[in-house]
Amino acid sequence: METKLDPIKNKLNSESDFSKDTLQNGLRVITVPTYPTKSVTIMIMAAAGSRHEERRVNGISHFMEHMFFKGAKRHTNAMEVASAIDSVGGSFNAFTGEERVGYFVKLSAKKKKVAYDVVSDMLLNSKFEQEEIDRERGVIIEEIRMYNDDPMSRVQMDFKEHFYGDQPLGWDIAGPESVIQSVNRKDFIEYKDRHYSAANCVLVAAGGITHEENIAMAEQFFTFENHGTRMSATPFKKLEGKRSTLRKRDIEQAHFTLGFPIPGDEHEDQAALKIFNNALGGTMSSRLFYQIRERRGLAYYIRSARSTYVDTGALKVSAGINVAKLGDAIACVMDEIIKAAEEGITEDEFIKSRDNIKGRNDLALENSMSVAGLYAGHETLHGKIKTPEEITAEIDAVTLEQANAVAKKYLDPSQVRLAALGPYDDLETFDKRLDGV
């Protein structure tokens, strides 16, 4: 058992207080009590994202997320699943990423047993009836088309495909329509048996609950028959290729995403990269927001962000631009990035960026869903817990010199990749603007 407690306290109040046990069947159970609160979030996470798929079933992780809500043994259809949570005023949802999938319920702590009942029934007893699979195909395909028609979403998918290439990390999480049309019940059963084992799942309860209560509920409801093993994602292979890709689309606003390769999310440089990225384009007072939107009026939205996985990642800049000014905007963004990397950010920018990150992290801790997701994510992906206080300590340990050093190290113009979307035929024009004005 792994426990971090303050023995002086009668109750667990610090954000770093948590308890962790592994049940006999292999399920890891984590409790993060927070007081005073009348609610609790129950979340179960599995290492079963799109990075764990083969090409022939690309999209099945996300499709399966949908199918788990279609009925099981105790709650036999989608209406019964929804009604069980609705009847106690709770909320529930799920999400699928490249490396993990999560299912959660937030409800009154007095009704927490309902959450364990519903979620365990979904994961352990789902029927995957062929009729339901066939019906849900249409829903998934419409979801794919919805994001494909949204240029902001489409350019992000184009960037990921261009940046990571034809390997699981570069595939669309929702999959291609051809796969969604072809997967069958046998595919679902095989994928579930392999990835939804006790050892590959993490159960987290955050909010008004004790560890003893969480353990008791877990032992009662999450009776996995399959101990299984912890799953590893398909390793990433670095790509070499052209800098840019263009999708022609007749729209009134052009969109682009450009990015640079950075290391995985547990790398020692990540805390410094967080601070530099925030100063570059993470807030409304950041360099890119001021220079591109406020000073030049080139964009309504512009932002930078880190997108990281266990072994790799990207620092990305995205914006929506007047179609006549896309080239100018790309060049201006590159100039600002190169300037920031070469000259560094100022001490004032560093302090503001660091404190902004810490403040936003504190705000997230007021939401039990965020807390559950934080603990579940670290345990699922890395097999260990990193508490909010440890994350803050990492941020506080970064110096201005370190933040500027990682920028110079990773923001190499020769490594930039670009995805653009708009009413254009000539990719070369925009590719050249990556060299600046």
Image (cartoon, rainbow, N blue to C red):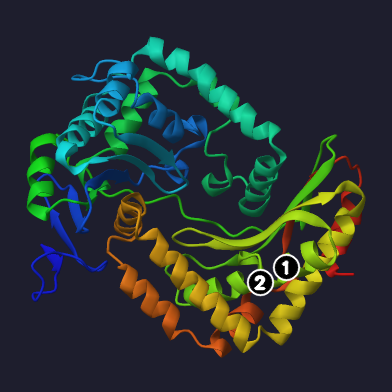
Residue 149, percent from left and from top = 70, 32
Q: Quadrant of residue 291?
A: bottom right
Mark 1 closeness class: few <14, some 14–19, many ≥20 residues within 10 Å: many
Label 1 near label 2: C-beta < 8 Å?
A: yes
Using the image, tell me which numbered label, if any, was put on residue 280: 2
User: Compared to 52, does 282 lie above or below?
Assistant: below
Residue at 62% over, 81% down:
349
Using the image, tell me which numbered label, if any, was put on residue 220: none
The residue identified by callout 1 is: 288
Viewer-proximal residue, 111 or 420?
A: 111
Viewer-proximal residue, 147 or 196?
A: 147
Q: Where is the C terminus found, in terms of image quarters?
A: bottom right
Mark 2 closeness class: few <14, some 14–19, many ≥20 residues within 10 Å: many
Amino acid beneath label 1: Leu
Label 1 residue SS: helix
Amino acid beneath label 2: Leu
Q: Could you tell me how far apart the alpha carbons at marks 2 and 1 are, in whole angstroms?
A: 6 Å
Q: Earlier in the sequence, mark 2 or mark 1?
A: 2
Residue at 27% over, 50% down:
230
Residue 232, percent from left and from top = 36, 51
Please say whether residue 393 is visible from this viewpoint: yes
Label 2 residue SS: helix
Tell me if 240 is positioned left or right of 180 in this view. Answer: right
Residue 302, percent from left and from top = 71, 58
